[in-house]
Image (cartoon, rainbow, N blue to C red):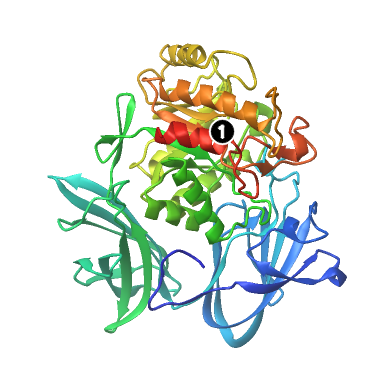
Amino acid sequence: MERLFKTHRVRESSVLEGIWRFYPEGRPDECRQVLIPSCVETYPGYENYRGIGVFEKELFAKGNVRLCLKGVSHTAEVFWDGEKIGGHYNAYTPFEMVVKDVKAGKHLLCVKADNSCHPDSALHVINDYYNYGGITRPVIVEEVGEVWIRQIHVRPYKKDDIWHGEFSVRIENLADDKRQVGITLDLESGSSLQAFSMEKETITLQPGLNLWKKEIALPAAESYELDAPKLYQVWGRLWEEGEVVDDLIDRMGFREIKVQGNRVYFNDKPVRIKGFNRHEDHALFGCAIPVEGMDYDLRLMEEMGANAVRTCHYPNDERFLDLCDEKGILVWEEGHARGLDEKQMRHPNFRKQSLDCLQEMVENHYNHPSIFTWGILNECASETEYGREVYGEQYALLRKLDKSRPLTSATCRHFSDICLDLPDIVSVNIYPGWYFDEDVKGYLEKIYGWVQETEGKGKPFLVSEIGAGGISGYHAPHRPKWSEERQCDILKEQLLGVLGFEAGSGVFIWQFCDGRVPDENFGGRPCCQNNKGIVDGYRRRKLAFETVKEIFTGK
């Protein structure tokens, strides 16, 4: 499944799922059949494999073939009939390529996925979460003509109490000369009822990538509200000689997100965050969680009374974002960089790799109405002048790509961060009662008071991480550290303190589920797990589940 809705009615498109061949590079004698998407570490015998995995699949294809790989960890090389046709760095964003004039018949697609922490990687490093390997998200195969629609972005805004849409359509022209085409846009509700249909316009395409824009008043459009998440499908079509030659469908909702004073507003209503940090990690599936598993995660969060999720610390599978759109769950989506010091940020590839990730994240996920903020650089070197330069560069790129959402970054550089003038929302990671013994209310007042003495003064204030560890199944009457009972005690004090702090805008609990961490580092993580989950890696509920539910729901 590519998305939770059909993305084409005209263009021939299919998901290249099912059985592939896999073997470690240089060891074809170990060839086995595997299902894709999946993680190498979930294959018996390869639980700790680091290196290049070779994935092969035969397919029938013809014409101009567009390949879109939604996620390959962590570095990819792609081959078509033995010839390299492309590559990509970053496990968490899609990439694509077009193979032109393919002769009708069977062809061999080969993907080499490297999950090793090699010297050229600035982002894929040993960290406090596990970087799984493999083809971890869907692979899409499409047949396109010489002109085709790459993307449709819609920026909704209100003017004179009427919803408008700024439509930006990216169109590829594979020909060597100009082409005249017709373009239409339809806006449909989930029941396929037409809310708007644009008269056909004729446009001239230059060779290569073209951008066409149009602003349209949409008086019939209904607002996307968190308690009534109204979604629309945008159907773009290209016409030649009276026939539709290509189409693309994406989904969006009409809403505005604003920062006013120290509050975040969603359609002019202040938002109070009760959320979770969630890694893409599952004891059975690694990061290649099936859609049913994603939905189950969100249903557990909803049962606990959560209204938000943070995609720590990388862009998420867009099917997960689709589910959040449908449920009206707010999303903080984040670029890929976590806990890097200045030396790591001075890696010669760091700036390019992290900027590329942000660009690809926004371009591919722009239309999701549930995303209320873009985040960057979790717990990086925001206390240094060089760090400030990097933070400024990344914020500038995000503001260029998307003017409709506020921006943030989670800091743990308390009392030394020099970047709080840059985000729209100030976010802090704190663990009173777990990493240090201090009263939650007093510590919050101390942190907030410091922020008010910086350029972060008066901005919305979020607790982006707070929590405590609890090893699933470990119980003791004296409630020691790592017991489920002690986890409940600490979480209760933390959450009551944060949600009772009137100046704050809410909290993201660290974290939704236990997750694997690398053996090489983080010796303080029992069982090589980050055990702060409210559920374990199999989604079995800890005692903390009921504690969080009681506080978040007030029941």
Q: Can residue 367 be seen from the camera position used here?
A: no
Residue of label 1: 378
* SS label for mark 1: loop
Foreground of the two, 39 or 228: 228
Q: How many marks?
A: 1
Is the residue marked by circle 1 packed among few (<14), some (14-19), or many (20+) residues within 10 Å? many
* Residue 154, visible in the rendered structure: yes
Left or right, residue 97 beside residue 371: right
Instruction: Classify 454 as above or below 496.
Output: above
> Based on the displayed image, in which of its 4 quarters is residue 312 positioned?
top right
Picture coordinates of residue 553, whole percent (x, y): 41, 36
Could you tell me which residue is drawn at 44 percent across and 75 percent down? 175
Q: Which residue is most to the left?
A: 160
Quadrant of the snapshot with the C terminus: top left
- In the image shown, does 421 or 55 lie closer to the viewer? 55
Instruction: Indicate the amino acid at tag 1.
Output: Asn
Q: Where residue 469 appears, x then y in whole percent?
A: 65, 31
**Above or below, 279 relative to 37:** above
Going 75% across and 29% down the picture, which residue do you hit?
524
In the rendered image, which quarter is residue 527 located in? top right
Q: Position of residue 45 (x, y in %)?
A: 83, 59
Q: Nearer the viewer, residue 551 or 240?
A: 551
Report the residue that reaches farthest toward the front. 477
Q: Position of residue 134 (x, y in %)?
A: 69, 59
On screen, 363 above or below 10? above
